[in-house]
């Protein structure tokens, strides 16, 4: 570590929805660095405590927060902590915007309101999404995604989904609108209330790689890939449109860097590695397991997203400063690790 972190080792960090795909990796990275973690869950998760027991007594604990919509939902959970990483969000892919967007926004505002009541809290990070900038598309190289880019398109469509859009993509639009509105609400909170903590948002694109406990963690987008082989689910993963990806440990480290890097202050940090398409995934999977009957390439062929994200270099630098490596994992390595614990794959 080439920097002095904004929070000293031994500080307590609250991670919401700590049983999730990205969140478990965030917890794991924090524990490896010597931070104590309090994770919120909706109900008791004994397997989660067992997963992190190797770090020793007093390093990881869980607290029940069964509803994000209660204004005081996080009041108890935030007591005595030094930093917060808010990852909890609605990932149901429901097409009912009224049931997805307001609760997602409320969850963000409520955790920030509770954090603002605690003078010990110096840093707050929101796990936002690439969809808070744009829906995935085959952009031309002239399109530049920056911290000023917002997904107004998804917001405009979410409550009145247009005809002609594939049913599977409608829930994606609603999710994108919810993440956009939630992140906007966070920045509005900072402007209006000027709390005593530094705030940053992390925007991960498609996240792939190892699932820490496959029996208990569906694995979100990482699970979609895994389930092609494990469950012969050839449909869900087709939600992947041309876009960027990031390996899950790299993604977790961007969140930790947003919390701990002293230069990270009021920033949108992009967790983007490189662009990919379904054909890229299939090519690698066929090389890894040639005897398996993988799905056919999409027809018509997808067109690569060639947009640029110049600010992702900031995230890379922060991670390198904190963890000593700025070399992020490739798509092939990410896919290899997605299947490394699947019996009979290798």
Image: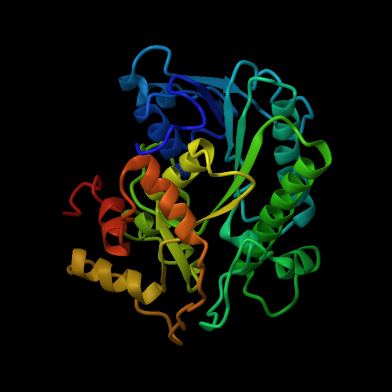
Q: Is residue 64 left or right of residue 285?
A: right
For the point 42% across and 52% down, the residue is 317
At x 43% / y 32%, what residue is drawn? 4
Q: Residue at x 36, y 39 (%)?
A: 2
Q: Which residue shows up at 57% across the image and 20% down it?
A: 63
Q: Is residue 93 left or right of residue 337?
A: right
Q: Position of residue 56 (x, y in %)?
A: 34, 15
**Where does the N terminus fall, quadrant-wise?**
top left
Report the front residue among 100 and 72: 72
Q: Is residue 329 left or right of residue 63?
A: left
Residue 324 place in picture, x, y as percent: 31, 44
Figure disc tally: 0
Residue 247 visible in the snapshot: yes
Q: Residue 78: x percent and y percent? A: 64, 22
Q: Residue furthest top?
A: 57
Q: Is residue 177 above or below residue 138?
A: above
Which residue appears farthest toward the bottom when viewing the image? Answer: 300
Q: Nearer the viewer, residue 144 or 23?
A: 144
Q: Is residue 342 above or below residue 282?
A: above
């Amino acid at each position: 570590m080439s920097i002095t972190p904004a929070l000293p080792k031994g500080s307590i960090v609250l991670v919401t929805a700590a049983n999730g795909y990205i969140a478990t990796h965030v917890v794991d990275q924090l524990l490896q660095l010597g931070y104590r973690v309090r994770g919120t869950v909706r109900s008791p998760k004994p397997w989660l405590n067992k997963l992190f027991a190797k770090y020793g007594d007093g390093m990881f604990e869980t607290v029940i927060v069964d509803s994000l919509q209660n204004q005081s939902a996080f009041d108890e959970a935030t007591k005595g902590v030094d930093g917060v990483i808010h990852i909890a969000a609605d990932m149901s892919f429901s097409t009912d915007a009224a049931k997805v967007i307001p609760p997602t926004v409320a969850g963000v505002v409520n955790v920030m309101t509770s954090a603002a009541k605690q003078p010990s809290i110096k840093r707050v990070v929101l796990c936002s999404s690439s969809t808070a900038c744009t829906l995935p598309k085959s952009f031309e190289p002239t399109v530049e995604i920056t911290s000023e880019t917002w997904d107004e398109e998804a917001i405009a469509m979410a409550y009145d989904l247009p005809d002609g859009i594939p049913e599977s993509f409608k829930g994606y639009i609603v999710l994108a609108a919810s993440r956009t509105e939630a992140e906007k609400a966070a920045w509005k909170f900072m402007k209006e209330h000027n709390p005593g903590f530094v705030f940053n948002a992390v925007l991960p694109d498609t996240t792939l790689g190892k699932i820490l406990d496959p029996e208990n963690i569906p694995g979100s987008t990482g699970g979609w890939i895994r389930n092609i082989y494990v469950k012969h689910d050839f449909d869900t993963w087709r939600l992947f449109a041309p876009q960027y990806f990031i390996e899950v440990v790299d993604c977790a480290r961007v969140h930790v860097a947003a919390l701990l890097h002293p230069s990270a202050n009021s920033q949108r940090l992009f967790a983007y590695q490189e662009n990919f398409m379904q054909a890229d995934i299939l090519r690698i999977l066929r090389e890894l397991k040639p005897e398996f009957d993988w799905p056919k390439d999409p027809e018509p062929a997808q067109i690569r997203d060639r947009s640029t994200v110049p600010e992702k270099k900031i995230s890379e630098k922060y991670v390198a400063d904190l963890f000593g490596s700025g070399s992020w994992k490739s798509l092939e390595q990410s896919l290899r690790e997605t299947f490394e614990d699947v019996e009979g794959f290798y």
